[in-house]
Each structure stands twice: as structure tokens, then as C-alpha cells.
Image (cartoon, grey):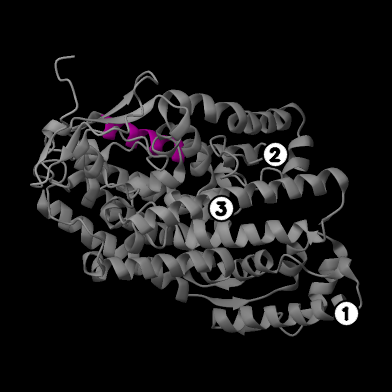
Amino acid sequence: MKIAQRIGLVLFALGFIAFIGSLFTSTYTLSNQLISDSANKGEQSAILQDILKNVVDKTYSSKWEFSSKISYEIEKINEFYRSQEEWEKVIYNQKELLFYLTKNSANGPINQEPSLWFLLTFGVGILGAILTNAFSYLGHPGMKNNGIFQSTWKSRGTVGVLLGAFLIVFYILLYWFPHYIAEWALMLDSLSEFLSGNPSSQWFLYGFLYTIAILTMGIRFIKKYRHNKYQMVRTISVMFFQTSFAFVIPDILARLNLPAYDLKNIFPLDYSLFFEWRLDEYLANGFIGYFMLFWSISLFLIGVPVITYFYGKRWYCSWVCGCGGLAETAGDEFRHLSDKSLNAWKFERISINAVLVFAVVMSLAVIYAYITGDNNLYGIDTYKIREWYGFLIGSVFAGVIGTGFYPLLGNRAWCRFGCPLAAYLGIVQRFKSRFRITTNGGQCISCGNCSTYCEMGIDVKWYAQRGQNIVRSSCVGCGVCSAVCPRGVLKLENGTEEARLNDESIFTFGNDGVLKLRDDLDTHK
């Protein structure tokens, strides 16, 4: 079995090398036909053909030189049209246009044999990951008490830092320079056309990689926690919801010329819900569109408070959410890096609630603009508000920091410090929910496993030693603290609200530093 695991590691390494190397295998030649196909309007097609006439039919060996030349020419003509206030002629979708032109101008082995390169990169890498993870954790399941309690730079390791750097670079390219990874999307054209009927975009590429990461690393997680049914079932749940609701179903809807909607994505995490293009798309699709809009609003207003009342925020954060699914599977190896300090907790409460307020204000502003047609709200451009939210929160925080910093800040940095939906769920869980983690302080041996592996930075041991229930708004109910406890001290419950908040410690520390039962308790009652 160890041989199979090593073979898997070799295959993954080979697939990854081919994956990176594929970005440097093409030359680029732009044609007038491609320019014409890329423009939605005939007028813009003529404008593009005119400004890119010095690029057409020339072969570039460098992707950087090719894209830089196109960007320079487009920006030069845009400056002219802006100065003349001819706004209808300005080319706004430069990022998408450059990605399209780069991808379809590529000449080389990948556009000639995309299926073969898909097998050599994605196929070999996925096979290697499956073999590696399927034969991992061959000994006892679960975690051992390895003494890692505080987050230190040393505990991250060189591999973790390099992985973090790779993820950060990947997200920067994905969000702002997708043309540099056009070959990866080119290899997925057949799969994208099969599902949605459209060529692959950078977002289809991202969804595919996201789903594969959850599926392959989910195998590893299940192997690791095979002694705990709760962990196995919830991991299968996030694997299912990511594959079906987040990846396959939206593409099938697009194939049917319906809004490509992720039915499990809830406002305000789904911050574009009230953008005019989304609302227009829903309203233009009749009954199906109205249903999708009704479903989205109902989940936010009714679904979240009702389900969270009975089950806590774990029903979404640990069973359904794609962000949580990636954190629990691909990010599981970094869960012990979450900062458990008091300062981190103070910052967390300010940060996540500030993002929630930002999301609500931004949404109210865009709703106002949609209803009134006036983009100016108290002297503020509503378009700029949503633009800054999309950049700062939707891209930088949720993407670059939220995932790229897994090996640096732990696997739930976004869920803990930035997710507005997690903040909303947490408020309900903290003040009106049946969910709690109960503790049996008399059995706690202070090993620290629970605190070490709490991805949300909760010092679980502090509560366990005192016999206090844990009802923190940040707790996502992943149950790992219970799974790694050697004494069965912790238990996830959905009981009645009575005695849910037991702020008074059952146990306390005496003057000699020994944990003991409080003197004022009548143990005979």
C-alpha cells in the first residue's frame, strides 16, 4: 500500500509539472475573424479591428508581449474616447476580452491536442492525488496529541509557505490576469461544452479545480476520520453539494439558457444577488427566474434563521458551503494554525461584522439605484461601492487571503474574519439557537487537542476545563474538537434552549492551581 501511495505522489508531481509547463508551450497569432467574433456589436468589432491592425497576423512567442501589445492599443483608444466623452465606444470588458483573444490565438500542442494534454495534466494529477489519499493514514485513524498548540512560523514549514505562495499567485492571475492561464481553460473546452454548451472560461476552470480539490482531498479526510461517522457523513455532504449544486447544475442551467444559479449560495455571501444584471436576468426568464429570486430571498430571510435555530450554523458552514468544504478537505492539514489569542478574537468580532455591514450597505445602495435609476446616493457613486466591495471582499479577502493564506493563517481565515453570511449565521446561533457543544469538565485531562485543532481559533480547552457549554458565534460545528478528544469530553447537541447558556463554571481553579468542583454547588440536587 505504501508503494501505491508513493506511485501516487510521483504521478501527482509529474501531472503538476506538466500543468505548469503547459502555460509555456504556445505561440500567439491574432486574426481579424477572431476580433469580429469577440465583439458583441458591429461597431465595436470595427473599432477593435482598427486599433489592433498592428497586431493582427503577427506571431508572438511570448504571452506577455502579445497581451501587453493588445492592452496598450485598447487603453490608448479608450483614453481618446473618454476625452471625447464618446462612452458608447469605450471598451469596458478588457479583462474578459484579453482572456478570450489570448486563449483563441494560442497555437501549439495544447490547441492541437487538448484532450491529450488534459490527460497528461489534470488526468495524471488527479489519479496521483486519488492514489496518494486513498492509501494515506494506513495506521490508526484520527489525530495524535503532537503538542502543536501555538501558531508559529516554524510549524507552517517550507512546503506550506511555498504552497501558500503558489495559491496567492494563482488567485491573482485568476481574478485580474486570467489571460496568463488561458491554456488551462483551453484544455477544459470539451468538458465545458458538454455541460454548458459554451467554451471554458476562467471561472469554469476555477470551478473544476475547486471541485476536484474537494473530491480528492475529501477522500483523505474520510480516511483520516474513518472512526467518526459524523465526520464521514458531513464530508460526503460537502463533496455532493460542491459537485452538483455549485459545479454541474449551474452549467446545465446555462445550457438550457437559464440563469446559471448556484441554489445553495445565500446572500450576503452571494453579494451580487441584487445587481441590476442579476435582477434583469431573473425577471427576463419568467417563472423559473422569479422562482430563483424568490428562493434566494427566502433562504436569507426564512431559511437561515429557522434552520440555524434548530441546528446552528453547522448546517451550512460544515455541510453545504463550498468555502467550508474546501477548508475542511484541502485545508484540513492547516487547521491547527488558526490564531487562538484573545487579540485575534477581538479582531475577528470587529472584522467579520464590519464586512456584514459593508455588504448590507452596498446591497441597499444597488437596490436604490435599480429602483430609482439614480446611481448617486448622498453624493456617492453606488457603482463604486459595489466595485470596491467586489475587489476588497469578493476578490482580495475571499480569494487571495481566504484560500491563498491557508498555510499561513489556517484554513478558515475567510470564514472566521470575513464571510458576511457566517456573521449572520453566527448572530442567530449565539442568541437564538438550540445548538451547543456540551462539555464534561470532570473528564478533561487538558491535553489541548480540542483547542489545537479548532480551525475557528476557539480555545475549546478553556471551556472544557470549566464544564461550560460552547455557544460561540464563530463555531461552525465541524465537530473535530469532539473527534480528537481522547476522553469523550465534548458533544455536539441540538437540545432545548433551557440551560444552553451556562456562563457559570462548574469547575474552577483553586489557590493551589488544581482544578476542582466549585464549593457553592449542592451536588446532591
Give x and y (percent) for residue 416: 42, 50
Residue on which the image places disc 3: 354
Report the disc number at residue 241. none
Out of 13 and 465, give the one closest to the viewer.
465
CA–CA distance in space, label 1 to label 2: 38 Å
Q: State the residue at coordinates (77%, 66%).
A: 36
CA–CA distance in space, label 3 to label 2: 37 Å
Residue on which the image places disc 1: 83
Q: State the residue at coordinates (82%, 68%).
A: 45
Numbered disc in front, either 1 or 2: 1
Q: Residues within 10 Å of mark 3 (few under 14, many from 20)?
A: some
Q: Residues within 10 Å of mark 1 (few under 14, many from 20)?
A: few
Residue on which the image places disc 2: 257
Residue 510 belongs to magenta span: no
Residue 242 belongs to magenta span: yes
Out of 158 and 222, give the one closest to the viewer.
158
Q: Which residues are magenta?
A: 230-243
